[in-house]
Amino acid sequence: MSISEIKKMSVQERLTAMEQIWDSLCHEDSEPESPSWHGEVLAERKKLMDSPEAKYLTIEQLRERYR
């Protein structure tokens, strides 16, 4: 199916198709392999979390920040 064919579908039809695709992926026996860069990103984020400079906010602080 091409992008132009997908764009001809209604929003509800596209959402239904996405739900069906997601459901089919959830029931796969195997998981897709993560790309190599993904491990690097996670390692860098863990390093930042473990650093003494790491600052954590409460949920309330986050809500205030983005209001």
Image: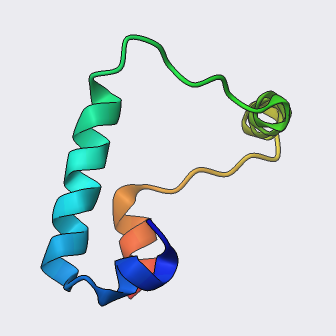
Q: What color scheme is it?
A: rainbow
Report the side of 12 relative to 67 (left or right).
left
Check the picture and name the quadrant holding the C terminus.
Answer: bottom left
Give the residue at x 76% y 35%. Answer: 38
Viewer-closest of 25 and 53: 25
**Above or below for 63 versus 48:** below
Viewer-closest of 49 and 20: 20
> Where's residue 52, x and y in %?
82, 38
> Where's residue 66, x and y in %?
45, 82
Report the side of 64 relative to 26 (left or right).
right
Report the side of 33 relative to 51 (left or right).
left
Give the residue at x 82% y 47%. Answer: 53
Could you say which quadrant of the image residue 22 lies in? top left
Report the side of 19 relative to 57 (left or right).
left
**Above or below for 7 versus 25:** below
The number of callouts visible is 0
Give the residue at x 16% y 62%. Answer: 16
> Where's residue 20, x and y in %?
21, 48
Check the picture and name the quadrant holding the N terminus.
Answer: bottom left
> Where's residue 40, x and y in %?
86, 32
Give the residue at x 74% y 33%. Answer: 42
